[in-house]
Amino acid sequence: MAESCLDDTGLDVTLKFKTRQFEHEDIQKKTYTKWINAQLTAHGQPPVADLFEDLRDGTTLLTLLEILTGTQLNPEIGRMRVHHLNNVNQAIQLLNHLNIKLVNISSDHIVDGNPKMTLGLVWSIIQRWQMEDVLKSSEDGMAQTSMEKTLLEWCRQCTQGYQNVDVTNFTSSWHDGLAFNALIHHFAPELFDYNQLIGSDSYTNLQHAFTVAHDRLGIVRLLDPEDVNATSLDKKSIMMYITCCYKVLSQNKKNLSLNSQDAHETSPSDAAGFQNALEPILMWLLDAQDTLSRQKPIADEVQAVKEQFQEHEEFMVRLTVQ
């Protein structure tokens, strides 16, 4: 019998890894379900109760994609497995048509209720319609690393100058709840006194941030305090929630009285106005950097080189006019 691999604390490393994996699955399942239900209920459709079960026949999946794409889709009505497979295949074909990459995910996986593959499918949908679209990515999609970098830099700019907040990632930086509150306070300082939160426990700070964001700003509550106040944080779920915050906060600055004199006086940093002006410039620079990173090496054939030169010339012209 193979010996167990133990860490410094005497715990089985394999067991710890599996436990952490299951924890991430549970958080993702709950977060993804909330996101899907927000889309469905906003259009008068019944919500999902169990993500893995309710997507198996493909009808809810097609309803979701119909809402997101504005394209009328016609699911097959029937209880046989072939009907379910055809529905899921229709959804996968649509996603492929939209250049949404599904790695090793088949209709059988979804119809069988495979947790890992179902989460992977939903994450691909979320990336496109919750993250890439919200961050105004380029037409052919932004790489996840660039998308993550853009979102992280936005968070850093917005929370700069707040005591006990240093955003360097989408996991541990958010654990104590202060970063969430700082992000909200940056855009709506009239809602609460940030300094009163310093010294409070993590659960209290997280509950405060999620409640204020939902009740006062209309940000969908994808996370609960226990999802973040945990030993192992799920990066995807936190990024999802931050993107919801970005959509509401960054795109509705005027409605949040960001430019009012009171907001300026209660801002934790005198550089707040500069940060606000920097945000669209930062987004533009990151988008340009991403476009350059996708350019192919210089070709060997003359015609191909001419085409590459023309594309690069058009890109340089766009830089000068923006």
Image: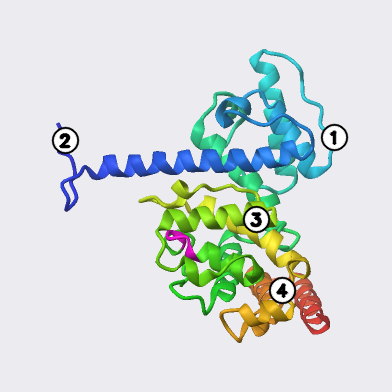
**Mark 4 burial class by Cα count in 10 Å: few <14, some 14-19, many 20+:** many
Q: Which residue is mark 4?
A: 258
Q: CA distance from mark 1 to mark 3?
A: 26 Å
Q: Which residue is mark 1?
A: 72
Amino acid, disc 1: Gln
**Mark 1 burial class by Cα count in 10 Å: few <14, some 14-19, many 20+:** few
Q: Position of residue 155 (x, y in %)?
A: 57, 69
Depth check: 93 or 171 in front? 171
Q: Which residue is mark 2?
A: 2
Amino acid, disc 2: Ala
Q: CA distance from mark 1 to mark 4?
A: 40 Å
Secondary element under disc 4, as helix, strand or loop, is loop
269 with respect to 130 (left or right)? left
Q: Which residues are magenta?
A: 174-178
Image quarter of residue 49: top right
Q: How is the image coloured?
A: rainbow
239 with respect to 301 (left or right)? left
